[in-house]
Amino acid sequence: MGRTLVIGDIHGALKALQQVFEKAKVTPDDTLIFLGDYVDGWSQSAPLISYLIALKEKQHCIFIRGNHDELCYKWLNENTYNPEWLKHGGQTTIDSYSKLSPEEIKLHKKFYEHLLDYHIDPQNRLFLHAGFTNLHGPEKEYFSKLFYWDRTLWETALSLDTQLTKSDLKYPKRLLLFDEIYIGHTPVTRIGKTTPVNAACVWNIDTGAAFQGPLTILDTDTKTYWQSDPVFKLYPDEKGRN
């Protein structure tokens, strides 16, 4: 049996992904769960998507939708974008797509269209990019965009009183639904960390690869993790999402 490995936000850093795969000794027997935000940041957004499309042919991959992926798809599909997107990595993504053929772009659109809002495995572990707000679980969520934009789930877990037990009436109901929840979206560098952070049942795997941090891959069973070099060192002539 292979491992179940979860990968944090990549943001166009194909070099970091390839490096961390080597460090983790990823094999075709492993299941790979990507938490989204494949694009916007470093210069290899389009090549990264091509790499992931090819990777899916070799092994079991689960691709979650991130907010940056949705923004990129909107641009590819409608040729429109929010100007703020350009400031947060969108321009590097546009530049990287200028080198692709129409046939390749068509394949990429299909990739984005088939991204999942969330995944629940047989061990009652939830994987999604950002969060959800409905107290009955993600399948009851009213607004699907929250799956890749919400920050309240992480803020709730991070601020939870460690003295509070699950039997306490004040314990957040969302955190009782799953044994573990894996997210990205909000870099742990915001709280001064560069390694995965566990708060209550939530594991945040976004270790700031878009900025000054490394890319992380984590074994969901053992909690062993591997990290790339700080990504900016792999792209010394670029700024990333500064």
Image (tube, rainbow, N blue to C red):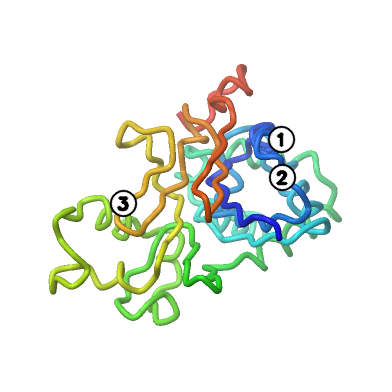
Query: For this view, does 210 lie left or right of residue 196?
Result: right
Compare residues 179 and 60 and report the one nearer the observer.
179
N-terminal of the two: label 3 or label 1? 1
Which disc, if any, is residue 22?
1
| Residue linked to disc 2 | 26
**In the foreground, 238 or 61:** 61
Residues packed near mark 2 inside 10 Å, few (<14), some (14 to 19) or many (20 plus)? some
Alpha carbon separation for disc pair 3 and 2: 27 Å
Q: Position of residue 58 (x, y in %)?
A: 82, 56
Viewer-side residue, 71 vs 208: 208
Residue holding disc 3? 199
Assess disc 1: are there few (<14), some (14-19) or many (≥20) residues with their C-alpha within 10 Å of its C-alpha: few
Residue 213 location (% of width, % of height): 48, 30
| Residue depicted at 48% across the width and 37% down the height | 87
Q: Secondary structure at mark 1?
A: helix
**Circle 3 residues within 10 Å: few <14, some 14–19, many ≥20:** some
Mark 2 element type: loop
Instruction: Mark 1 and mark 2 in contact? Answer it, CB < 8 Å.
Output: yes
Kindly identify the amino acid type of the residue bearing the numbered disc 3. Answer: Ala
What's the residue at 32%, 54% (across, down)?
A: 154
Label 1 near label 3: C-beta < 8 Å? Answer: no
Please, what secondary structure does the residue beneath circle 3 have?
Answer: strand
Counting residues from the N terminus, which is met first, the one under dot 3 or under dot 2?
Answer: 2
Whole-percent x and y of residue 123? 51, 70
User: With 1 as the anchor, is 141 left or right in this view?
Assistant: left
> Which amino acid, mark 2?
Val
Vertical order, 201 against 227 (above or below): below
State the residue at coordinates (40%, 74%).
143
Quick check: 4 above or below 212? below
